[in-house]
Image (cartoon, rainbow, N blue to C red):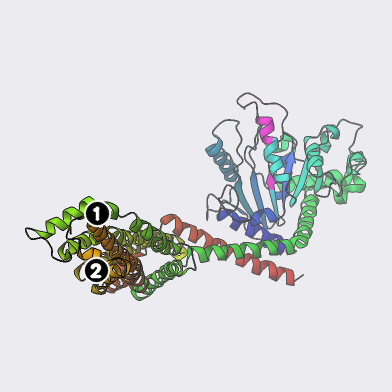
Amino acid sequence: MESLIGLVNRIQRACTVLGDYGGGDNAFSSLWEALPSVAVVGGQSSGKSSVLESIVGRDFLPRGSGIVTRRPLVLQLHKTEDGDQEYAEFLHLPKRRLTDFSMVRKEIQDETDRVTGRTKQISPVPIHLSIYSPNVVNLTLIDLPGLTKVAVEGQPESIVQDIEAMVRSYVEKPNSIILAISPANQDIATSDAIKLAREVDPSGDRTFGVLTKLDLMDKGTNALDVLEGKSYRLQHPWVGIVNRSQADINKNVDMIVARRKEREYFATSPDYGHLASKMGSEYLAKLLSKHLESVIRARIPSITSLINKSIDELESEMDHLGRPIAVDAGAQLYTILELCRAFDRIFKEHLDGGRPGGDRIYGVFDNQLPAALRKLPFDRHLSLQNVRKVVSEADGYQPHLIAPEQGYRRLIEGALNYFRGPAEASVDAVHFVLKELVRKSIGETKELKRFPTLQAEIAAASNEALERFREDGRKTVVRLVDMESSYLTVEFFRRLPQEVEKGGNPAAAATNPDRYSEGHFRRIGSNVSSYVGMVSETLKNTIPKAVVYCQVREAKQSLLNHFYTQLGKKEAKQLLQLLDEDPALMERRQQCAKRLELYKAARDEVDSVSWAR
């Protein structure tokens, strides 16, 4: 039976070490919260400390007037074999065993002062103490500051509400067992502990009532109505306690002797003799241990479910954070290549439509390029005034005889030069889309998030490659424009005279000797405009082909090829630098690994105890 409570104690202690309790930053449901424990509640000077010392069998708690317990004390009792030496361990002093319990008292006081200062302030940060002894039962008790009604000198006015809020934060939890301590020499109706317990546990299922100072009641009075459940009934029996007197404390009376005196008091008492077998600190400890055991057994399915949920969350987190880096250079190179491939795969998904972004490239060809071509200043270039000027200058000192061929050529070449702007703009637009897709792909590659240095290297290598592809694309589209200028389509112009003859009067044309009339220049401008329009339609189709071939296709096929070549030349130290992680991420992975180990060990131990039932 005790092994199950001991297991819970070990799990709680491990949770605390890993920061799942007591102020730790944990994104997962706390395992601590699911594990039952006993919260000790009472007013100041109600005898809380004496009850705890009686259960432990040791004098180890600070004493004094007013508020003495100013931080929660999480006390874990571990039963050892008969004959073993008793000792205590603080969580903040790992591997330091204290066998002198007066030093335990001093350390509790010193550790309290370290957080609250030498004042009467309180703090919710708990102190964790484990006691190993053959004279205890396996049990977890949480000693809380005593409830009070007024603030004394040196305390803030809010101290009453602060203490109550702290105590409530423990006793409101459905897995908390409430040990409500009240002095017998006061009216139970005024008990702070019972009042609070009634509010958070109205059914009384989680509350154990303890009545202290029975030996200090007025002569002729007793507390039988309370102990027998007549004054205030709980689901569990009341337990009476007789603590050491102040004289015994001053004389350092041994706790073993005090326990014997307590047994003798109840056995010989005319009022409580019939209840002697169910009174005293030893009975209280066994009662709490037995109840805690039954509660834990009832909660095993929910505890196991929570542990499994936490394991799933942690394993998912570990997958997200990635596994530790290998020390072997070959393994490191393999890791880098795998990360690069993961990035490359996402980048291609953006281009091929598996992820958004690639459609913007089509938008360049379908919207931006045609719009830019329509905005070219051909109207100005082919205005009547400019056509006359260009044709006249092309004729030189001798006018053209039949058709102004040189004028045509100059007009066409001048018009085709305008296509360079939209062509290069298309290259640049696609380049910026590709750069943005690289940036997005790096951000979406989860495996890369832990390696900022490698992210930067991949981004730099990708952008360098895209610059090369842009330069190739620019040269290609400019070459397409230059090709149109270097060789005009003769068939287009051979059709022009036939079209004039079919549509007009050749005799009228033959009798008109003025080749420099306004109509003549308008006809030249119209012919050039038609030819430029034909070329525009051609380039509207060929420029996208060139851009895709030189930039998009190359980005899909060889974006990181140069980077791969450089990787093969790097030494182990340089590879490790690429895999340099964010220290916060490394710390997070270590914490997750420790928690995962804890939860798996806890699951195995809970399962083993569960099967042994």
In the image, residue 369 sits, relative to residue 93, either above or below, namely below
Q: Amino acid at mark 2?
A: Glu
Secondary structure under tag 2 reads helix
Who is closer to the viewer here, 481 or 577? 481
Quadrant location of the N terminus in the rendered image = bottom right
Q: Which sits in the foreground, 608 or 494? A: 494
Taking the image as shown, residue 212 lies to the left or right of residue 424, namely right
Q: Nearer the viewer, residue 600 or 39?
A: 600
What's the mark number on residue 381?
Answer: 1
Earlier residue among tags 2 and 1:
1
Q: Quadrant of residue 441?
A: bottom left
Relative vertical location of residue 56 with respect to residue 479 in this rendering, above or below: above
In the image, taking residue 539 as reference, residue 118 lies left or right, namely right
Q: Quadrant of the C terminus?
A: bottom right
Residues drawn in magenta: 142-163
Where residue 325 appears, as percent x and y from the top left, is 41, 68
- How crowded pointer 2 is (Cα within 10 Å; few <14, some 14-19, many 20+) is rated as some
Q: Main secondary structure of the magenta part?
A: loop
Which residue is situated farthest in the top direction here? Answer: 153
Q: Position of residue 44 (x, y in %)?
A: 72, 33
Tag of residue 484: 2
